Amino acid sequence: MLPCGVGMAQRARDLAHCASTHPHARTRMNEHALIALAGIGLLGVACQWLAWRAKLPAILFLLIAGILAGPVTGWLNPDRLFGDLLFPLVSLAVAVILFEGSLTLKLDEIRGLERVVRNLVSFGMLISGTISAAAAHWLFGFDWPLAALFGAMMTVTGPTVIVPMLRTVRPNAAVAKALRWEGIVIDPLGALLAVLVFEFIISSQAGDALGHAALVFALILGTGIALGVATGHLLGLLLRNYLIPEYLHNVVTLGLVFAVFAGANAVASESGLLAVTVMGMWLTNMKRVPVEAILDFKESLSMFFISGLFIILAARLHPGEMALMGWGALGVLAVMQLIARPLKVALATVGSTLSWRERVLLGWIGPRGIIAAAISALFALRLQEHGYAEAKLLVPLTFLVIIGTVVLQSLTARPLARLLGVAEPEPRGVLIVGANPVARAIGRALFKQGFPVILADSSWEHVSAARMDGLSTYHGNPVSEHADRRLDLVGIGHLFGLSPQRDLNVLAARYYRREFGDRGVFTLTASLEDDQRESKHGVAAEFHGRPLFGKGVSYRKLAERLRQGAEIRATTLSEQFDYAAWCAANAERAIALFAIDPRGKLRIFTADAEIKPGVGAVLLALVSPEAKPPAA
């Protein structure tokens, strides 16, 4: 999709020739390449971890890391490191990212928002592109052909920036779905629009620009849709009929993504992105096709690719080119953020069910990402070869927009969502598997402390009793398809497997691990009496959640203590009566369950981690009644 320029290719050939004639130089170059690749991977992981700790989108840290590694320190030079392979590798990585994103686009999830998404990726895209082009012409000084190309490139948002931002901003379901669908669908369409404008510019020199652009459009659209549908359907049939062993699902899928992307581009240049997007959408919406394992694998792969791509492309910036940016570039950014995006959303959502608050947030969030960076680098090289000297400013202006939109929206979108009242609450709540007496007692104790609680059980008797206690419930199997569609997990961040059916607890832990993460899934352990048969008849420990309340604290033990009159009590720790004093006072008659720190964070006692609550913490424990003294 994205070939590199003549100058870069020549430098790579010079280096290769030098290395071939000097063995020691070749060894040093190989060592440097190995260190650079490892460094990119470590930087990406570190940026993702920092983003998690700081609760900011990772792209912000990735861009900073790339700029520091490239133009600031000179440690990373992607053109020299990858040579002719740079843009093909970028292209394949972008294809995987778009395919993974399209696997999340289930048609039944967007009911009610179909028209909004259609408007955003059709005439809405043209509105924002036209305004961006006008700003680039009048404020930055691009001539109209170059300004039109810039406007076309700026229509894309993309899952590389939208999905990480959604994790941090946490808008409500309607806004999140609209943004995710728009970002994934508009990437290939925006790239297609940019290709059409580019072909129009080049062919206008030959005198048949309009006819050539129309032919290119038809060829790209037809090729992308045909190959995407055919390959997606073929893969779906193979998976549905068990013609591919499970251990090959991910490998076969990845190979087909690469093949479809490359094959589509060979038939019609730049149609590969559309083909892999259509392939993923078709596959995930086929009936009875297991895509969960594929999605898990592609999600991890996409995160790794996103991290590396942003670092690599940011490292290609040149300080001299960035220095040429002036107030006009900032004006372009301001127009895109304050006029183009809000106007696009305002017109695209007319007559929709979205509230004005949701529309305001939707009109604020529209960061640019990998596709804009990649195609700007491609077209800048090609246009310079055709005599457009100003094209060298396409890349720095594009990165200014990327950095500006990412930084501005990363810092403001979450506070704006909270101010507008369209942000999901922090995931403090608990989904409890079971509504039995043990589950109800724990649910009541957490609910009294202000934590949202949902009890899920197939027993109507248990569910009725939980409702009488004022607790939220779900009547049904928590791992059913119905629960997947209807169970509202807004504000829920933990799973407790408290059912006496241990297999159900384990199944729920596996099912919800992707939703809550390994640290948010907990199940009760086996009783001490069951330990001896656990290795033969029990489920392997790796499939359990974290062990609730300590080793040997089983459902049987908790239920027996409740029958004997034990109750869950809340104790506020102080300097005079700290955790050590509480342990000494309660000894064997209490089982510590939870500690709520002064900031309101729930900490759970488990067998795999030691908790020592401090002063001001509220300790919840199941306390048995004191034994009565023997009669005289």
Image (cartoon, rainbow, N blue to C red):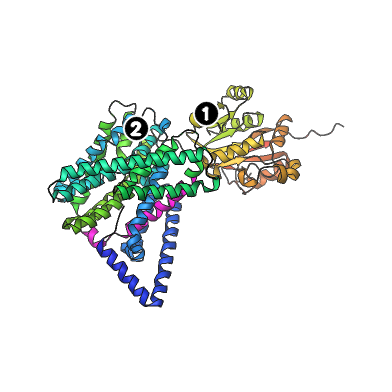
50 lies left or right of 90: right
Circle 2 packing at 10 Å, graded few (<14), some (14-19), many (20+), is: many
Image coordinates of residue 515 in percent, x first then y, are 51, 40
Q: Residue furthest left?
A: 207
Instruction: Write the residue at 33% across / 71% down.
Output: 15
Kind of residue at disc 2: Glu
Q: Which mark is residue 137?
A: none
Q: Which mark is residue 482?
A: 1
Of the pair 360 and 347, the residue shown nearer to us: 347
Kind of residue at disc 1: His
Image coordinates of residue 194 in percent, x first then y, are 24, 46
Q: Are marks 2 and 1 in contact (CB under 8 Å)?
A: no
Instruction: Write the residue at 60% across / 41% down.
Output: 522
- Give the extent of the magenta segment: 296-324
Image coordinates of residue 213 in percent, x first then y, are 20, 44
Q: Does 126 sit above or below residue 261?
A: above
Q: Does 555 sit above or below residue 611?
A: above
Of the pair 142 and 575, the residue shown nearer to us: 142
Disc nearest the viewer among 2 and 1: 1
Instruction: Write the residue at 28% across / 53% down.
Output: 399
